[in-house]
Amino acid sequence: MEIFIRKETKEDYDQIREVIKSAFKAMKANEENDNEFNEWTLAEKIRKSEYYINDLSLVAVKNGTVVGHIMFTPLKIKGDVQNYESLDLAPVSVHVDFQNQGIGKLLVQSGIDRAKALGYKSLIVMGHPKYYQAFGFKLASNWKIGLDTEFNSKYLFALELVEGGLDGVSGIVEYSPPFYNENGELI
Ligand SMILES: CC(C)(COP(=O)(O)OP(=O)(O)OC[C@H]1O[C@@H](n2cnc3c(N)ncnc32)[C@H](O)[C@@H]1OP(=O)(O)O)[C@@H](O)C(=O)NCCC(=O)NCCS
């Protein structure tokens, strides 16, 4: 199977929309959880913001067709005395017809490699433990990094992109503004 990972371009947007829609529709159908919020709207919101990182907005292409997509955005870890810069992985999607063929893994690994090359020191993701531990992610609570002061999320993971990339880092995760609604709630 020949899959290429490359930066997204404007010409990909329509296909990316279909990929994200198909991936999350399938997931929500499985979970019987249909939020009003749509992940494809999030991707579009990120693109229009100053937090968009084109170098880390990637597509997986098979036979000339976009079959997967991933985005990374800046993230802050707000400590007691100072804030730390990190990077968030979200959303990631593989078209429902192409899932479980290793495309998601290629997208995540390519994103990790590119983020390292760009000099980012750490990465945060909210996701399934088994999926992300395979890349070396560990529970963010190991560093006392969390969504609140309890630091007890089972789904929040962190990865050091350089040795000691999270040394001395702890605090509460603040996503970039596109991840919050007009009431300041995480969407
Ligand atoms: C999650 C997702 C990106 C994975 O991509 P993929 O190409 O299907 O996955 P891969 O082929 O790389 O990896 C397959 C492995 O992931 C596991 N997996 C697939 N979807 C998963 C999910 N939602 N949660 C946990 N594990 C998942 C499979 O069980 C398989 O495990 P194995 O390697 O132990 O057999 C894709 O399934 C998807 O788009 N899901 C819907 C959207 C979503 O949940 N995005 C993540 C939240 S932002």
Image: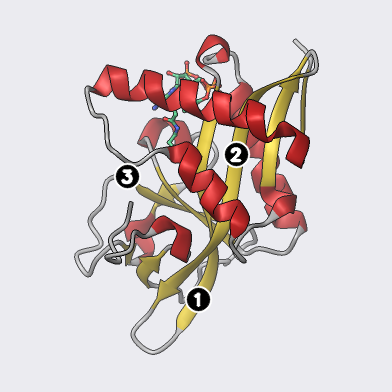
Q: Alpha-carbon distance for marks 2 and 3?
A: 18 Å
Asked whether 64 or 79 is in front, the reply is: 64
Find disc 3 in the rendering and name its residue.
Answer: 155
Q: Nearer the viewer, mark 2 or mark 3?
A: 2
Above or below — where is 49 with respect to 58? Answer: below
Q: Decide: marks 2, 1 in contact (CB < 8 A)?
A: no
Q: Determine which of the numbered discs, if any, sits on residue 70 in the image.
A: 2
Image side of residue 64 versus residue 160, left or right: right
Find disc 1 in the rendering and name its residue.
Answer: 84
Pick whichever of labels 2 and 1 is earlier in the sequence.
2
Badge 2, how many Cα within 10 Å: few under 14, some, many 20+?
A: many
Image side of residue 161 versus residue 55, left or right: left
Asked whether 34 or 3 is in front, the reply is: 34
Locate residue 9: give its quadrant.
top right
Q: Is residue 106 visible?
A: no
**Dot 1 amino acid type:** Tyr
Residue at (32, 57) in percent of width and height = 186
Above or below — where is 148 with respect to 52? Answer: below
Q: Nearer the viewer, mark 2 or mark 1?
A: 2
